[in-house]
Image (tube, grey):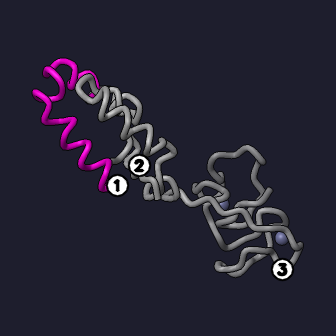
Amino acid sequence: MYCRNCGSQVDDNAVVCISCGVPPLKGSKHCQNCGKDVNEMSEVCVSCGVKLITQKATDNLSGKSEKDWTTTLILCIFLGAVGVHRFYTGHTVWGIVYILTFGGFFGIGPVIDLIMIISGNFKDSDGRLVTNK
Ligand SMILES: [Zn+2]
Ligand SMILES: [Zn+2]
């Protein structure tokens, strides 16, 4: 395939382009199939007709967590004192802290978490919102 940033040929499995140093699919200036110049906004290459692959590094940062909101809520209500909802959402260290501090700082932690979960502001360990929306 071709680097989408600079248009030079790169290995199909290349993590970074050896010519320009960015991930080959992160660019938007060239077609990954034929290497021709493409419009940065276009989704299909006008030279060869393939769908242009885009890989935005920020996609995962602001998105929605794949953790289930209802599960997180139920775990927090019934097992919140031992931090099970924290383990579930990847906050392993916090889960252990909850156990060691007699139910999350004597029960305060799980209550705050419960409010955060219900209001849709609870985040998993990757910083993505656990939401039912
Ligand atoms: Zn490149
Ligand atoms: Zn093309």
Q: Main secondary structure of the magenta part?
A: helix
Mark 3 C-beta to ligand 2 under 8 Å? yes
Mark closest to the chain's N terminus, 2 or 3: 3
> What amino acid type is highlighted by mark number 3?
Val
Q: Do the residues under discs 2 and 3 have CB atoms within 8 angstroms? A: no
Taking the spot 11% from the left edge, 29% from the top edge, the residue there is 105
Q: Do the residues under discs 2 and 1 have CB atoms within 8 angstroms? A: yes
> Residue 133 or 29: which is nearer the viewer?
133
Q: In which quarter of the image is the N terminus?
A: bottom right
- Reading the image, the residue beneath label 2 is 130
- Reading the image, the residue beneath label 1 is 120
Q: Residue 46 carries which label?
A: 3
Determine if residue 128 is in view: no
Work out how far the residue at label 2 is from the one at label 3, CA to CA, in angstroms: 39 Å
Taking the spot 34% from the left edge, 55% from the top edge, the residue there is 120
Q: Is residue 18 magenta?
A: no
> Percent position (x, y) of residue 86?
33, 32
**Quadrant of residue 80 within the rendered picture:** top left
Q: In this view, does 16 lie above or below 50?
A: above
Rendered-image quarter of ligand 2? bottom right
Where does the magenta region start and end? 94-121
Mark closest to the chain's N terminus, 1 or 3: 3
Q: Residue 39 carries which label?
A: none
**Quadrant of residue 39 within the rendered picture:** bottom right
Q: Which residue lies furthest to the left in this view?
A: 106
Element on which disc 2 rests: loop
Q: In this view, does 79 lie to the left or right of 36?
A: left
Q: Is residue 119 magenta?
A: yes
> What amino acid type is highlighted by mark number 2?
Val
Element on which disc 3 rests: loop
> What amino acid type is highlighted by mark number 1?
Gly
> Percent position (x, y) of residue 10?
75, 53
